[in-house]
Each structure stands twice: as C-alpha cells, then as structure tokens.
Image (tube, rainbow, N blue to C red):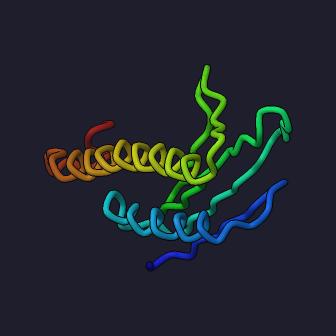
Amino acid sequence: MTFPVKVTFHNTRHSDSAEALVYELAERLTRFHQRITHCEVVVDVPHQHHHKGNEYHVRVILTIPGQKVVTQRHKGDTGTHPDLLAAVRAAFDVAERRLRNHKPREKQIRKFQRERPDDGLSAAAAIG
C-alpha cells in the first residue's frame, strides 16, 4: 500500500479483524483512484442500545490531491449496522462508488483542456 491508513475506534473496543478488513479494503480502492494520499477510518458506536445491541457507524475519509472524499449518511439511512464487519464493508462500498464518480470528471477536465482550440490570438488582441 502506498498511502497511510489510520483506523480509530470510538466508544467501542479495538477489533483486529475489523482493522485487517479496513487495510484490505483500502488497498482495493487503489484500483479506482491511484492518487489516494491518505485514508482515515472512524468506527463509532453512536448510541449504545443494550436491548437491541450495538449499532456500528463507519466513516471513511480519503484524501486525494485537491480534495477529500468522505462517506456520510444519506437521508433515510442511519448508516449504522449491527455487524461491525458489515458496517466496514458498507462504508467502503460507498467510498468506492464516490471514487468511481470522481474519476470521470477528472478525465473530462483533462480532455477539455486538450481539445480547446488555440486560435493564436492573444488576450489583448481579443479585447481590443
């Protein structure tokens, strides 16, 4: 892996299996964007429901040149899962989709810059 991965557990115990899964899934993200410079994963138990069991919320923050890609909850989706490993996989699925959507826009900008016609006029000649 060419970028650092930081895993933080809040309101819950450290899990070696969850951390190993985070490293494995973070490595997979390089297939969708090669310029990831940092990955931070936060595992949280926002409310400790002892009748229902703990619900895990996992947030993935990826740093790529020029911006951060953050997984967040969607309307109607609490973003929590009763199974820690399922929560980790779901958060990385969202991060993967965001990276897939980010990549084409980056290519479009480069393509537009290459195809822009150069008419040879200077800025001063175009104004005056």
Instruction: Examine the rendered structure and indicate whether residue 19 appears above or below residue 117.
Output: below
Spot the residue most to the front: 51
Residue 63, percent across and down?
Answer: 55, 61
Residue 28, percent across and down?
Answer: 38, 64
Instruction: Examine the rendered structure and indicate whether residue 8 appears above or below residue 51.
Output: below
Instruction: Examine the rendered structure and indicate whether residue 37 appears above or below residue 53.
Output: below
Q: Nearer the viewer, residue 76 or 112?
A: 76
Instruction: Examine the rendered structure and indicate whether residue 118 appears above or below residue 82.
Output: below
Spot the residue most to the bottom: 2
Q: Residue at horizontal 54%, vertical 54%?
A: 67
Q: Is residue 24 left or right of residue 58?
A: left
Q: Residue at horizontal 83%, vertical 33%?
A: 51
Residue 85, percent across and down?
Answer: 57, 54
Q: Nearer the viewer, residue 60 or 37?
A: 60
Q: Nearer the viewer, residue 122 or 102?
A: 102
Report the number of numbered marks.
0
Placement of the N terminus among the 4 image quadrants: bottom left
**Res 81 quadrant in image:** top right
Placement of the C terminus among the 4 image quadrants: top left
Residue 127, percent across and down?
Answer: 33, 37
Q: Residue at horizontal 51%, vertical 58%?
A: 66
